[in-house]
Amino acid sequence: MTILTLSKALNEGMRKAMEADPKVLIMGEDVGKLGGVFRVTDGLQKDFGEDRVIDTPLAESGIVGTAIGLALRGYRPVCEIQFDGFVFPAADQIISQLAKMHMRSLGAIKLPVVVRIPCGGGIGAVEHHSESPEAYFTHTAGLRVVACSNPADAYSMIQQAIQSDDPVIFFEPKRRYWEKADVDTSSTDWWTPLHEARVVRPGADATLVAYGPMVKTCLEAATAAEEDGRSLEVVDLRSLNPLDTGRLFDSVRRTGRVVIVHEAPVFGGYGAELAARITENCFYHLESPVLRVGGFSTPYPPSKLEEHYLPDLDRILDAVDRTFAY
Amino acid sequence: MTDASRGADAPPELVQLLTPEGERVEHPDYDIDLTPEEVRSLYRDLVLVRRVDLEAVALQRHGELGIWASLLGQEAAQIGSGRALTDADMAFPTYREHGVAWCRGVDPVKLLGLFRGVNHGGWDPAEHNFHLYTIVIGSQNLHAVGYAMGIQRDGTNSAAIVYFGDGASSQGDVNESFVWASVFNAPIVFFCQNNQWAISEPIEKQSRIPLYRRAAGFGFPGIRVDGNDVFACLAVTRKALEDARSGQGPTLIEAFTYRMGAHTTTDDPTRYRVASELEAWKLKDPIERVKSYLFKNELADQAFFDSIDAEAEDLGADLRKRCTEMPDPDPMEIFEHVYALPHSLIEEERKAFAAYLEGFQS
């Protein structure tokens, strides 16, 4: 066991992937000498060289577009998008090219490209540095979308994403980059399949559903609720597309009450899909309507206001109270 | 602007080896030495791809294709550059490179699937080193540069070529591809067919300077070639590919040509350009000048031209037959090839839709 921050766990995971397969490349802005603005790729260029850890020109469409070309040539590029709000210049390459080329080629082309996106708020950043754009990508057929929430998952999931023959959008909870945990880097036996959800805290009275940065917040809420005599289960979805409906529905059917938590705006957000599917599949098990807690239908606010915008322990527990009011 | 003479006067910097009248001319930097057999072969390519194109337009008019993007007028640019490629080179087309597809050995009927609506692309790019047609303008430029960066890492003696148009030169992706190719010194040839029109917008809406001159700002050579001269297109592309393969980096080739037909079969050029412009360009037809050259130099006789015409007719008839025989895909094919690996949501929807369809059987 090694104690790793989430950021270092990703770094170790990529290092392992690069050692295992010489076709794995890292590319993005400042990923080389600097090691990335969050240092996630720290030291990799020094050890693997400039041909494999590529400091690219500053253009996101160029990063993803050339990654597609490298993948066509047999490489497995891992692209870093520096911040969530900067992924949109690459939207055409991701949505119209990366996601669709496998089908366009009737299966002849495989594009094992990973697009890493640090996401979410809570770090006091300026505009465009705190967004949660996952729903744009879960809505796009052809992409796999995952979100890690802790160092051990970060370490294993990044390697699984790199091994995937499908393109993977990989969300990293930037405010959790410095969270530490024990990670067993000597074995893969403990790895959970990439697209499986996990119950991270068992409970009996209601289910909190989250992914990425909100998993920790939900765990804190569950701890606080325990003091009020409520037993909350927390499900970390880990994979948003495909969605592990089996584990999700199983939890909902046991507790009968659900609160979905994400940082992205609630309206048209990923939680809407979850709520619809839970209602369609678990209707007779539900004791109350599925509730959602998330960002408001506003642009992400200036950082002095973000604590009011982001779901926190109190807003989650307020929603839990409301599910028990039925 | 609707100046009928626009582009009709060859700019001085234009590389030309065969005049519209079929006269061989010299150029200080580019030369080509073709055997009579090679010239006849180029002529055959030009005629046959024009026939494929004509047939596809007719198939669209008969309702067999939903739409078709004609290459009429651009045969020399496509055959000249396409024949400059080696088997190991990789080509990235737009959706109009039927002539390049021909050079790469793609069965013309496979080009029709996309336009008939039975698939989004019907050939294996790796089999022919010819990528799928790309419809979003300019997106393929970045794929080509990435591919070229892969060639660079593999250390193989090959290059990539990417096709795009004058309209695409305004796209961010195309400009980003120039930046990438330049800073990484990627083994790539940018082949821009300036056919003067991006649907209804003339080149003046895209650029204040000749497109080939943009290369200088990105740090690599740009060259303008007579896009209706198959000899010049072959010579210039060959040189650019050799440079790319030997580590000299990218070249931008602007093939100065003319879209003699509509943008696609749904377009109506009479709404935005004058007939005299087309008439002026007809005098510079890419096929007539080669025919004239062969004839004047007694490199081919009437029997040769007749035999090519007969072959073209057979090709057209065969294409027509095989197009109309192309079956509609099975509804369940909607769920095929969305992902390379199993995907639970796709499986769930596949099962549900199959059960729904089965409901109509009982």
Image (cartoon, rainbow, N blue to C red):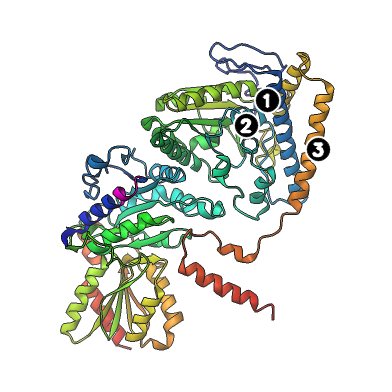
Q: In which quarter of the image is residue B287?
A: top right
Relative image position of residue A269 (x, y in whole percent)? 39, 67
Camera-nearest residue between B271 and A242: A242
Amino acid found under the numbered disc labelled 1: Ala
Secondary structure beneath label 1: loop
Determine the secondary structure under disc 2. Answer: helix
Which marked residue is nearer to the observer: mark 1 or mark 3?
3
Q: Majority secondary structure of the magenta segment?
A: helix
Q: Range of the magenta residues?
A: A17-22
Q: Position of residue A63 (x, y in %)?
A: 38, 43
**One can see residue B209 in this view:** no
Q: In terms of secondary structure, where does tag 3 sit?
A: helix
- Number of other residues with Cα within 10 Å of mark 2, as a class: few under 14, some 14 to 19, many 20 or more: many
Give the mark nearer the N terminus: 2 vs 1. Answer: 1
Look at 78% across and 15% down and name the residue there.
Answer: B298
How busy is the neighbourhood of tag 3: few (under 14 within 10 Å), some, or many (20 plus)? some
- Identify the amino acid type marked 2: Gln
Left or right: B297 with respect to B30?
Answer: right
Q: Is residue B147 left or right of residue B296?
A: left
The chain to which mark 2 is attached is B
**Which of the marked residues, 2 or 3, is nearer the chain's N terminus?**
2
Q: In this view, does B48 lie to the left or right of B87?
A: right
Which residue does the numbered mark 1 point to in the structure image? B4
Does the magenta portion include A247?
Answer: no
User: Label 1 crowding class (10 Å Cα cut-off): few <14, some 14-19, many 20+?
Assistant: some
The residue to which callout 2 is attached is: B78
User: Residue A23: horizontal and vertical position, in percent?
Assistant: 37, 45
Using the image, name the chain to which the residue with label 3 belongs: B
**Residue wearing tag 3:** B313
Please determine if labels 2 and 1 lie on a single subunit. Answer: yes
Badge 1 and badge 3 in a common chain = yes
